[in-house]
Image: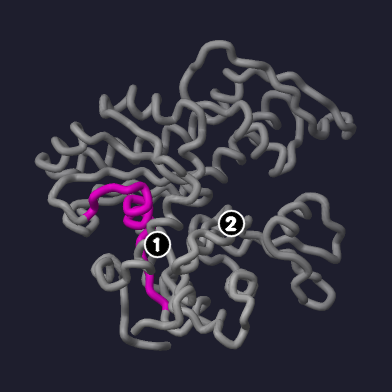
Amino acid sequence: MRGVIGRDMAVDLGTANTLVYVRGKGVLLDEPSVVALNTMTQEIVAVGHEAKRMIGRAPDTIMPIRPLKDGVIADFEACEQMLRFFIQAVHKRRYLAKPRLVVCVPSGITAVEQRAVKEAGYQAGARRVYIVEEPMAAAIGAGLPVHEATGNMVVDVGGGTTEVAVISLGGIVTSLSIRTAGDDLDQAVIAWMKKEHSLLLGERTAEEIKTTVGSAFPTSGDPDVEVRGRDLVSGLPRTVSVSTSEIRQALEEPVHAIVDAVRVTLDQTPPELAGDIMDRGIVLTGGGALLRGLDERIRHETGMPVHVAESPLTSVALGAGRCVEEFEALQAVLVSDRRRY
């Protein structure tokens, strides 16, 4: 089974970012999941950071596409091209690039969506494609003892999905995957500014506001922030000053949905495991874990201790990477199939 060392890879195929982990080398690539397509020739102009810079700024001939929506593949061709590009960016020696691939998928994904992910992996040049569920990878990456007979609860707030899962003895006992996550927080900011200030914002501006002043729980000394956009009445550019508490209000609905998912999952957890979680706490991972005060908010609403993982952005990729490093030991957590389509 062992290929050339450094050939096997794990890919965290996220809605917002794609991370590639290479065996023996760690996370070598972390780029936005964006592909820019030339509409005339159907050729790919840019991938990753370069393509993301084009969002909202491109002429008609260039179309930036996000191949994944809500954690699943929305544009198969673009996704396959993007995967191939990332695999080749990591593998300089082309002729060796036939890696075994471990890909992370949301836990609520259907069989058809799962097959699309595998197919994209094979099309991009993988020798074998294994699938691991995101909350499982996040728990392994956050260093939780997933194989022990204790309850571990992980909340992975990504770009397209929020995964909440309780893990024990190397398996997911109860899980919930909701399609409310980072992207919805951005959309909430856009909708709020439109409604309250008649100001139209771009996606990138909204994301910037979310990361700089967005919060889920009141904190002291909240700064105001200048927001630039286009006035819907006059059609001219305008700058508005917005308080942090107003942005918190704007984010309230998606944040509430995320907290609610945690509540529902706790409600379905067997009592023994719920006791373990009470001791050990809930671990937050994913980019959404960086939203200020989200841990406080969940702690406040569930009464459970909440910790943010050490490197929330990379924990899924690191967990999938561990599956590649310790392939034999962790094979049980992979969703494998012997059939090659």
In three-dimensional space, the C-alpha distance between marks 1 and 2, rounded to whole angstroms, equals 14 Å
Instruction: Please provide percent x and percent y for residue 67.
Output: 61, 64
Instruction: Please provide percent x and percent y for residue 177.
Output: 37, 51
| Relative depth, front residue between 6 and 53 | 6
**Is any part of residue 242 visible from this angle?**
yes
**Is any part of residue 77 visible from this angle?**
no
Element under disc 2: strand
Q: Compared with residue 112, is residue 209 higher up or lower down, i.e. above or below?
A: above
- Residue 30: image tag: 2
Residue at 26%, 25% in the rendered image: 303
Q: Are marks 1 and 2 in contact (CB under 8 Å)?
A: no
Q: Amino acid at mark 2?
A: Asp
Quadrant where the C terminus sits is: bottom left
| Relative depth, front residue between 236 and 307 | 307
Look at mark 1 in the image and give the residue it sits on: 320
Q: Compared with residue 297, is residue 10 higher up or lower down, i.e. above or below?
A: below
Is residue 2 inside the magenta stretch?
no
Instruction: Please provide percent x and percent y for residue 224.
Output: 68, 17
| Relative depth, front residue between 283 and 324 | 324
- Magenta stretch bounds: 129-146
Element under disc 1: helix
Total residue callouts: 2
Q: Amino acid at mark 1?
A: Ala
Quadrant where the N terminus sits is: bottom left
